[in-house]
Amino acid sequence: MIVLDTHVWVWWVDDAERLSQAQITAITANEGEIIGVSAISCWEIAIESTRLPGEFHRDLADQIIVATARIYQSPLVTSDAKILGYPHIQTIR
């Protein structure tokens, strides 16, 4: 078992080119086992949800979902009109 720091977790999912060869080797060697991500990493993403640019509605779950997509710099697939109207995230209807 290995545990990933938040930024390594994000890079592993979204931008593996930023990982060192040793990090890639460790993750690859443990893919069939357990790769841990601390609950505090989820909290770090939740904190980012309070720092969204511009105006966003107060639904905490939506804020965390949008913050997650922003951290991963990934489009968000949604039909939620409030999220679709938010200009600081790329969405896919």
Image: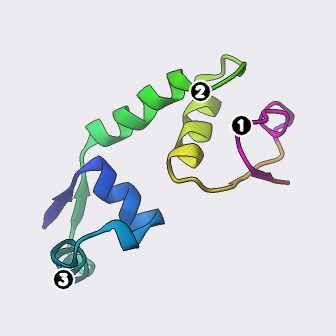
Tell me which numbered mark, 2 or 1, is placed earlier along the sequence: 2
User: What residue is rendered at 13% in x and 67% in y?
Assistant: 1
Mark 3, secondary structure of its residue: helix
Write down the quadrant of residue 3 in the picture. bottom left
- Label 1 sits on residue: 88
Q: Is residue 76 left or right of residue 26?
A: right
What separation in Å lies between label 3 and label 2 (alpha carbons)?
36 Å
Label 2: how many Cα within 10 Å (few below 14, some 14–19, many 20+): some
**Residue 27 - label:** none
Residue 85 lies, in percent from the top left, at 85, 34
Residue 46 lies, in percent from the top left, at 44, 31
Q: Could you tell me if the residues under marks 1 and 3 are in contact, i.e. CB atoms within 8 Å? A: no
- Label 2 sits on residue: 52
Q: Could you tell me if the residues under marks 2 and 1 are in contact, i.e. CB atoms within 8 Å? A: yes
**Residue 29 - label:** 3
Q: Could you tell me if the residues under marks 3 and 2 are in contact, i.e. CB atoms within 8 Å? A: no
Label 1: how many Cα within 10 Å (few below 14, some 14–19, many 20+): some
